[in-house]
Image (cartoon, helix red, strand yellow):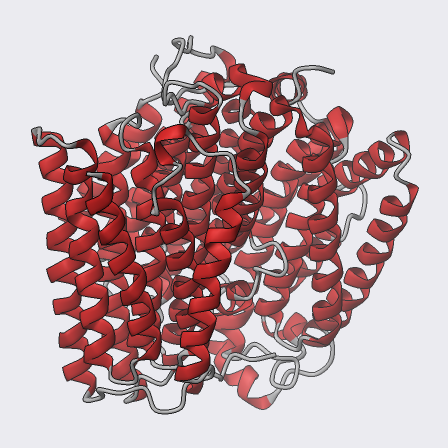
Amino acid sequence: MNETVNLLVGLAMGLNLLALGSSRLPGVIGAVAAQGIALGIMPLLLEGRADWHLVFIATATVAGKGFLIPFLLRRAMRAARIDREIEPIIGFVPSVLLGAAGAIGAVAIVESMPLLPEHRNSLLVPGALASVFTGFVLLIGRVKAISQVCGYLILENGIYLFGLLLLHTTAMFVEAGILLDVTVGVFVIGIIVDRIQRAFDSLDTRKLTVLRE
Amino acid sequence: MNSIWLIIVPVLGAAVAALWPDNRTRPWLLPVFGLAHFALCVWLLFSPPAIAEGAWFGFDSLARAVLPAVSLLFLVCGVYGVSYLRVRAERPNRVFVSMLLAMLALLSAGHQARHLGLLWIATEGLTLAAVPMLHFNGTPRAFEATWKYLLVGGTGIALSLLGSFCLGYASLKGGGKGDLTFAALTAQGTELSRPWVLAAWVLVLVGYGTKMGLAPMHTWKPDAYGEAPGIIGAILAGAVTTVAFTAILRVRAVVAASGAAAITDRTLLVIGLFSMLVAAIFLLGTRDFKRMLAYSSVEHMGILCIGAGLGTAGMFAALFHVWNNSLTKAALFMSAGNLHRAAGARTIDQVSGMARVTPRSAWIFIAGLFAITALPPFGPFFSELQVIRAAFEMHHAGTAAMFLGCLLFAFFGLTRLAFAIVDGRPRVATKSAGVRFAESPGLILPPLLLLAFSCWLGIAAPHVLQQIWTEAVSQLIPFK
């Protein structure tokens, strides 16, 4: 089972690089959606069994991260009539290089942290840190609101990956609450994107400069 | 009486507000449910409920030490809100009122949370519930502020979740069974895995520090406070920041129990002083009196952190300062809201002579300004004095010196701006706007009441409060 999980985490890390290197927004959204689905089935693989609690978490994650949120993002994209990031603050090639360096750095950091025996050969922790880092690069390095939301989602995905380490021991309430919050949070962000678009007639956050000291 | 009613009552209020048909009478739900909540809070303050072992939430010493301040602040804001929403009768207030009451429920939950996950959920909920309030005014600038608030605040809240997970992993690595209540984590003490605990401390400090508005994570604050209605600024600056601060204090207690107390104190001092310094610099530069209040809030969050990093005496002063900051800052936000409404502008380039246009609000604003810059007999003077005393007791003379220097520069910045808008001749545009703005008692008495309370805290802080602050300190720093 661990091998399959590692494969999926590796896939998620690859999708990070894809999201960093893609100038077209559908590509970024697709990468985020695929990552969401890969993450969603992980709880089932990790535990190797399927009680209603795990199935609930997996279904909710796949539905939310894999379908609902990407659907909302695509809708926002159509409403705003933009489909590519034109002048990123951090270019696409430097972004990919940064992401790759971040992935290597994540592995190096995790080497020096004490891990439980069952997590020693797992890519979960490096994958989590690499995704958090990727999320930050996108949040800082992109100017379109939709790209930034995608960055935020990848950041959340990294945190979710880390949370999987605690899946065995944390009560269900916490996980369900977290899932709900993530979904609602982005949903709200989606609405805001819509409103910003109407108010500014553009999704360029660089134009949000009235409030500057 | 069970403290869960502190959550149920405002939830009921939010539901009633969502269903209430009449836009004109709906705001009255704010003071009604605020009063019920405050009465409950006072009742529980005097007869604290027993907390079961391993309970996920409860009205413990720390909650008793700060939640009544938040409840009082909400009640006064509710009273002010009735008059404010009457002035803004053109806008529907269903979402506004019900979200405000939902925030009160989440504030109660966050202060009482004794479980890492529950604490996080409450804070996340607060972040989201505040969103509709921030763009209540519906202007493009309000949208811009909301976007920044969501992006920066959302990232902060995500990092605090990562920090919580790290703490959970530290517990697992140390042989824990996955019990994430603060009591269980503290009991594990030095068994917690040290590297993970330190990682958790950094992430939690950055994460909840973003919600608190500590520099350099404060960038959302001036925009959000500037664009939100005054009453929302009061609640964000006086109540939401308090939840984030108590969250940091609860995690600090766990990290200190694991043997890293010196590190936590040092980081709190550094981030506190840095916040004060950044705030002082920006206060000297800003020309907008609502943004000024945001920077002043950053400064006071710094003061709280410095107090928390100075041992038992400092922690006592910090809890005292939570009350002073909440009540005084709220009075300032309300009077600033009045000035903004009357003048129709917010910068010293456009506003002056408010002492003639809206004399009562202007004088409350000046009194509040002196209160927040620590003029006796107002409360902040005494709590800040205690912070300085604690600094000298702990042989942190350098900290005390920097603290005083930042206070001085903040004083220059605040007075420069406040007198520029209050003194002088009213602008022509301001004059005509002022005619339409009536200083009704509902807009004047609430901030006045808060200032009176701040004065009372300074001259004669009630014995029960002093006792409960001492108890909360011994909950947070058990070994000294």
Q: Is residue B450 above or below residue B2?
A: below
In the picture shown, does residue B399 fall above or below B188?
Answer: below
Q: Left or right: where does residue B116 sit relative to residue B429?
A: left
Q: Quadrant of the N terminus of chain B?
A: top left
Q: How many marks?
A: 0
Q: Quadrant of residue B256?
A: top right
* Residue located 60% across and 51% down the image: B329
Report whether B6 appears left or right of B343. Answer: left
Residue at the image point whose x is 76% and y is 68% from the top = B413
Q: Residue B436: percent from the left, percent from the top? A: 44, 76
Residue in the foreground of this view, choosing between B89 and B129: B129
Residue at the image point whose x is 61% and y is 79% from the top = A213
Q: Nearer the viewer, residue A179 or B282?
A: A179
Q: Position of residue A77 (x, y in %)?
A: 19, 80
Q: Nearer the viewer, residue A213 or B207?
A: B207
Whether residue B445 is visible: no
Q: Tell me if residue B193 comes above or below residue B106 in the rendering.
A: above
Q: Nearer the viewer, residue B358 or B123?
A: B123
Residue B99 seen in the current view? yes
- Residue under the point 33% across and 36% down: A165
Residue B402, position in %: x, y? 86, 52
Quarter of the image where one finds residue B89? bottom left
Image location of residue B150, percent across then percent down? 38, 62
Q: Quadrant of the C terminus of chain B?
A: top right
